[in-house]
Image (cartoon, coloured by chain):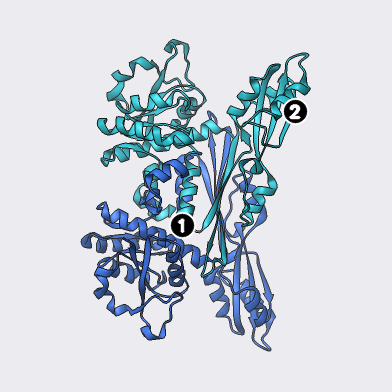
Chain colours: A cyan, B blue
Amino acid sequence: MSIRIGIYGYGNLGKGVELAIKQNQDMVAVGVFTRRPPESVKTLTGIPVYSASDVENMRDKIDVMIICGGSATDLPTQTPALAKLFNVVDSFDTHAKIPQHAANVQAAAEGAKTTAIISAGWDPGMFSLARLYSSAILPNGKDYTFWGKGVSQGHSDAVRRIDGVLDARQYTVPIDGAINAVRAGQTPDLSTAEKHERVCFVVAKEGADKARIEEEIKTMPNYFADYKTTVHFISAEEMEKEHSGLPHGGEVLRIGKTGANGEHTHVVGYSLKLDSNPEFTASVLVACARAAIRLNEGGMYGAKTLFDVPPAYLSTQSREELLGKLL
Amino acid sequence: MSIRIGIYGYGNLGKGVELAIKQNQDMVAVGVFTRRPPESVKTLTGIPVYSASDVENMRDKIDVMIICGGSATDLPTQTPALAKLFNVVDSFDTHAKIPQHAANVQAAAEGAKTTAIISAGWDPGMFSLARLYSSAILPNGKDYTFWGKGVSQGHSDAVRRIDGVLDARQYTVPIDGAINAVRAGQTPDLSTAEKHERVCFVVAKEGADKARIEEEIKTMPNYFADYKTTVHFISAEEMEKEHSGLPHGGEVLRIGKTGANGEHTHVVGYSLKLDSNPEFTASVLVACARAAIRLNEGGMYGAKTLFDVPPAYLSTQSREELLGKLL
């Protein structure tokens, strides 16, 4: 019996989920649910499109709903509402609001005896797991998370809102000296701004004052003012040709000490280099859908995260294969 | 209530466990169990030493026994025997024999309603987790495991057995060209010998035929014959000064493809650089002892591996801390 997956929301992430399901032979994509007129949406692989308002009628046809909305306004209401009807997976990534989101989803899912895996993806998600494992193993140590090189959508949007800007792309880039020091086992005190620089590519309107745009970017509070920021003005053609992808990645490092007097240093690193941020995130969500079903079958209801998932639950491989080949 | 840990066996690994427990404030080391005369053993931190034959009398005083014997002859009998008395953790690392070991331990632990986490450490262990997570997320992909730079005890011992050799240390070293190609997202077909070279440091007996020793090393089947091997003859003093540590490490990489036509490449890497192989392995075992208690309290009896452990079970942090700070 294939695991029957619904996809709620059909932007970059929803499209990534649709493609990822094709790589997993134990699953089938039942369809996409959209708030747009269904007939206006054409899916990549031809799976059906339903209206989001019809979702209640599909309870018997879907084992897990993967919710592909945004963290700012969609997921805080969508995940609790859908967890009353389905096992769900989301990628809620506003770190400071995760405890509140978890509490809201817990209340909905517990009552409905569904399982909701929230905040899956890579940060939160795989990077969180890297932080948890290495801090549990090496309690006497220090964590570092570097992001990039990759496109930050929030920072790109902030630049786009400046008067005179037609289009913009912002790359977050780890500072070589900082990341190399940590990889070598050093434990410097580093702020986020001391770990990363920001590189902007901007298409300006004809006749716009580029010096003023650059100044507005570099002095923008929170987003850029504290960082070393570089601004490049390019043509719309170059933007399309060189900067249309959504690469991202980064590295989580822990430097831990052991021995009678902390004389031995250990460097644990987890790194991602992703050609497509949404497709990798989608791939994590799809593996979590498999785990959600298994948790639910074991009576583990409520709001869960990757911290609660036995790793074997994510895999299609049998216990025999896991012990015999992968361990 | 502290978790009360027993340490069964007191070589490098047992000493590492003793030191690691000191870093974990929710635990206490009850004592060491040895097959040697207890009065002949002096512990690093002054914890008591008991005879291995007294272990049955300590059932009420120990929550988890960490078994620090060797995989070749100790663990195959020790782990099933001790799992009848205690929750246990071991580092059984003969990959080909893990399924049989798991079956033996399962039979013992299930009947006694104890929980046994077997084959913990870094390979098998953390490297296995890296392989499992990334293959579950990116099913269309290819795995690579590189070991080193680090001391291989088995290969060092093999060189020591050659006539005319007083002492030897063998380092396994990943081949730069191979590891860099994979890190860059390429997927070459590589044998173990194409991924690693072997570097030997040898102290020869006075007057021994060094050319013959070097030839015997380089042509030794299984251990060296298939590898690029370099042999350095050094003095006993240099061996003591430069090669007395037990560093190790390595890197697990998966290259995965996503997209409608596999057009996006993702590189997932997990790396370890360890000053002390036994102390890091011991640190993993100690975190697993915490998980073993929690699994047992949840009624999950029998032989388990890190694949079965919800990551949160390894950590001292509360759910609130994990969701609020680490996720």
Q: Residues within 10 Å of mark 1 (few under 14, many from 20)?
A: many
Q: Can you give x and y, in whole percent of width and height, for residue A101 in the image?
A: 40, 32
What amino acid is found at the position of numbered circle 1 in the picture?
A: Ile
Where the C terminus of chain A falls, by quadrant? bottom left
**Alpha carbons under labels 2 and 1: distance apart:** 44 Å
Q: Residues within 10 Å of mark 2 (few under 14, many from 20)?
A: few
Q: Can you give x and y, in whole percent of width and height, for residue A150 in the image?
A: 62, 35
Q: Is residue B272 left or right of residue B324?
A: right
Do badges 2 and 1 share one subunit? yes
Residue receiving disc 1: A137
Q: Can you give x and y, in whole percent of width and height, for residue B256 in the image?
A: 53, 40
What amino acid is found at the position of numbered circle 2 in the picture?
A: His
Residue receiving disc 2: A232
Does residue A227 sit above or below B260 in this rendering? Answer: below
Residue A52 visible, this angle: yes
Q: Is residue B288 left or right of residue A11?
A: left
For residue B181, the mark is none
**Which is nearer the eye, B166 or B287?**
B287
